[in-house]
């Protein structure tokens, strides 16, 4: 029987000491390399972290130093963060796909003296901008491939630095105790990590989270979902994102569970199937992509299999979520569901890597109600949460038995929430960040003297006590007739369709709503293949008339749904176009966390926006793009613009009620 989650201290080095003592031989980390899973126990992790920490100290890393961490999810990079924390330093994870300008800004702003990176690619990126970096002194790397002939004056492998630490330990056994005593001087109120925001409206801000922010939030989360040392998670999301830091480090340390690092992003699905995590997080796009993959494969299945699949899906849709919630279901339906579990649901969950899921979360965007219900009907306890970097993730979450697709749950443990007069959601919690690094103005404008933090999101509490997020507060506007315009709300409804990857809505102070749409190349490509539609590029597929017809049907379905919503019926979509290129972080159109940079898009695509509103049916555009190798090119296209049908509101006065 599993023991309750351990406590062990108020910082991660202290918790590591405790875990190594209590859970010494339990697996703490696994990594798949060359097709083989390697395992480190909690005792092993302590040894690895200690050696690296002592080696870093020998290189000159001291309390207060900022250390950049750049790369994919590797055990050595996670260890480096705790090794730095044991010295009183502050790790600063960066997005591995950051371009040079973004990386240079963060490294300089954070005043990073060291960088711990994954491989040659990241070494090259840091060396390329080294002339712009004011304080960076040394780079440590994990994978030595391709780096043999590099100048090693400012470059060391993590293994070499660890060997330095081990030699120090071997020469003087008292060093281990002295290092432990120094690590225990770090306190819960000290800064544990600095995570930079995505920078949707300007330069990213460095969010300083303390150990108390992270440890208290992590323990509350583990208690909320009854997580303990027996759990397995898959670490595949960006290390610079607060969610990965909490799920793969904070909660893992506080519960004592095992973090599994996949071989690569390309092998995540296979690796997840092998590990079968019990605790899982993914943005809606991952769940949508998995479902699309399943449905595409079923289109190619035999008639018998397809018929059985469809039948048991109907059974699951009728009773699956009720069984998951512990509600009363007839014996006949329970038997049918059990047969479905054996024939369809079980094999399907195994293929997706969800055969052992205890709880799964999605957040960041709204998830389609049908998609949400599909997973829950399969017996997967999928929930939504609401949070942000500044809150150490958790603001609200959905308790078991209170799962609704259109809300983000109740206030999380120890979290207070109130709605400001302008509709903005404010919260106060143990996870509330300390401050923005070197940005007192932004700190005071976000967090007041009483600890209330502005989320920037507009929301309402429903009668059931659950919070519903409407949109970013600053983005909510009005059409010229007074109807509410909530662009993110409209975009999310469009993105519920698997064929639509991204959408950008316009309408504030306009006569009607219009949208840009990005198709999902995989979903629409599969559809095109089944319908004998040939294409040579994204641009060609996006411009296909039959693709336009399909997207138009989706937009009109959204309008039908909006017509039934009193607050939103006045903001139905009147015109749309399918963009000739995918919105891309490298082109500045999206942040590294895939959030739309609205002002940049409005400026970059101003001629297309003008065409949406001047009645044009086509517009010729030339757009500059950045290629993966750094080259700059351009894409030229004639973009079609279409009108779509709108529908009468369900009752008169909807516009006025929404405005009031």
Image (cartoon, rainbow, N blue to C red):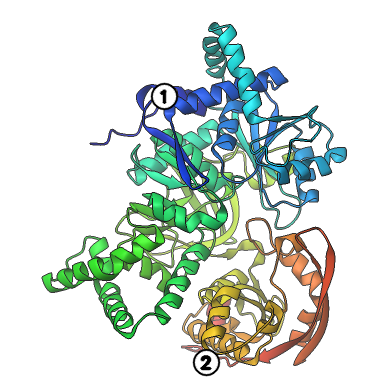
- At which x and y percent is residue 53? 60, 23
Disc 2 crowd rating (10 Å Cα; few below 14, some 14-19, many 20+) is some
Q: Which mark is residue 648?
A: 2
Quadrant position of the C terminus in the picture:
bottom right
Quadrant location of residue 472? bottom right
The residue positioned 81% from the left and 40% from the top of the image is: 127
Residue 413 % position (x, y): 40, 44
Against 629, is 308 above or below? below
The residue most toward the left is 331
Which numbered circle lies on residue 20? Answer: 1
Residue occupying the point 39% across, 38% down: 257
Depth check: 451 or 173 in front?
173
Q: CA distance from mark 2 to mark 1?
A: 65 Å
Quarter of the image where one finds residue 582: bottom right
- Of the residues under marks 2 and 1, which one precedes in the sequence? 1
Identify which residue is drawn at 76% across, 52% down: 99
Question: Does the image show residue 11?
Answer: no
Q: In this figure, what is the number of numbered marks?
A: 2
Q: Is residue 24 left or right of residue 31?
A: left
Image coordinates of residue 139 in percent, x first then y, are 73, 33
Q: Can the viewer see residue 521 in this picture?
A: yes
Element under disc 2: loop
In the displayed structure image, the side of residue 345 where residue 117 appears, left or right: right
Q: Position of residue 352 (x, y in %)?
A: 40, 62
Q: Say which of marks 2 and 1 sits in front.
A: 1
Between 454 and 183, the one nearer to me in the picture: 183
Q: Is residue 379 above or below residue 226?
A: below
Secondary structure of the residue carrying numbered label 1: helix
The reply to whether the C-beta atoms of the residues labelled 2 and 1 are less than 8 Å apart is no
Residue in the foreground of this view, choosing between 29 and 330: 29
């Amino acid at each position: 029987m599993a023991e309750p989650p351990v406590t062990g201290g108020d910082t991660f080095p202290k918790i590591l000491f405790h875990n190594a003592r209590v859970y010494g031989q339990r697996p703490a980390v696994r990594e798949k390399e060359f097709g083989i899973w390697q395992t480190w126990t909690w005792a092993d992790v302590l040894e690895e972290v200690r050696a690296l920490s002592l080696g870093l100290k020998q290189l000159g890393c001291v309390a207060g130093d900022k250390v950049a961490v750049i790369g994919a999810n590797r055990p050595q990079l996670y260890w480096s963060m705790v090794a730095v924390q044991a010295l009183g330093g502050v790790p600063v994870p960066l997005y591995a796909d950051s371009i040079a300008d973004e990386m240079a800004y963060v490294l300089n702003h954070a005043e990073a003296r060291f960088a711990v990176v994954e491989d040659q690619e990241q070494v090259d990126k840091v060396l390329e901008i080294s002339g712009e970096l004011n304080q960076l002194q040394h780079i440590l790397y994990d994978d030595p491939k391709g780096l043999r002939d590099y100048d090693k004056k400012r470059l060391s492998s993590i293994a070499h630095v660890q060997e330095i630490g081990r030699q120090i330990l071997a020469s003087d056994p008292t060093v281990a105790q002295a290092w432990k005593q120094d690590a225990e001087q770090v306190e819960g109120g000290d800064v544990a990590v600095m995570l930079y925001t995505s920078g949707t409206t300007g330069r990213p801000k460095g969010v300083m989270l303390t150990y108390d922010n992270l440890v208290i939030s992590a323990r509350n989360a583990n208690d909320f979902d009854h997580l303990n040392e027996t759990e397995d998670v898959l670490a595949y999301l960006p290390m610079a994102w607060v969610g990965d830091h909490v799920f793969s480090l904070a909660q893992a340390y506080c519960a004592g569970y095992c973090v599994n690092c996949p071989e690569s992003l390309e092998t995540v699905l296979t690796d997840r199937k092998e590990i079968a995590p019990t605790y899982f997080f993914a943005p809606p796009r991952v769940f949508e992509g998995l479902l699309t993959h399943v449905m595409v494969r079923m289109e190619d299945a035999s008639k018998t299999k397809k018929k059985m699949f469809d039948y048991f899906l109907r059974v699951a849709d009728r009773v699956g979520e009720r069984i998951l919630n512990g509600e009363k279901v007839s014996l006949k339906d329970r038997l049918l569901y059990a047969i479905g579990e054996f024939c369809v649901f079980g094999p399907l969950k195994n293929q997706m890597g969800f055969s052992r899921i205890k709880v799964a979360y999605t957040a960041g965007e709204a998830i389609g109600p049908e998609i949400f219900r599909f997973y829950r009907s399969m017996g997967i306890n999928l929930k939504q949460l609401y949070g942000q970097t500044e809150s150490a993730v958790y603001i609200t979450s959905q308790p078991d038995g209170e799962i609704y697709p259109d809300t983000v749950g109740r206030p999380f443990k120890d979290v207070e929430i109130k709605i400001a007069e302008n509709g903005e959601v404010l919260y106060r919690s143990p996870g509330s960040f300390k401050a923005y690094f070197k940005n007192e103005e932004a700190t005071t404008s976000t967090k007041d003297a009483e600890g209330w933090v502005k989320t920037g999101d507009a929301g309402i509490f429903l009668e059931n006590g659950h919070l519903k997020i409407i949109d970013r507060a600053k983005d909510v506007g009005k059409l010229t007739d007074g109807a509410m315009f909530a662009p993110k709300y409209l975009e999310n409804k469009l993105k519920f369709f698997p064929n639509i990857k991204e959408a950008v809505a316009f309408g504030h102070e306009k006569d009607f709503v219009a949208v840009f749409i990005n198709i999902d190349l995989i979903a629409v490509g599969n559809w095109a293949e089944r319908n004998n539609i040939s294409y040579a590029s994204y641009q060609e597929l996006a411009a296909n008339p039959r693709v336009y017809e399909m997207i138009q049907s989706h937009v009109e379905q959204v309008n039908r749904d909006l017509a039934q919503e009193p607050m939103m019926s006045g903001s139905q979509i009147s015109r749309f176009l399918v963009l000739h290129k995918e919105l891309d972080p490298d082109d500045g159109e999206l942040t590294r966390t895939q959030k739309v940079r609205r002002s940049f898009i409005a400026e970059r695509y101003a001629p297309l926006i003008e065409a949406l509103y001047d009645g044009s049916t086509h517009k010729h555009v030339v757009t500059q793009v950045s290629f993966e190798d750094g080259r700059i090119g351009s894409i030229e296209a004639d973009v079609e613009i279409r009108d779509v049908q709108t529908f009468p509101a369900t009752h008169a006065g909807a516009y006025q009620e929404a405005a009031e």
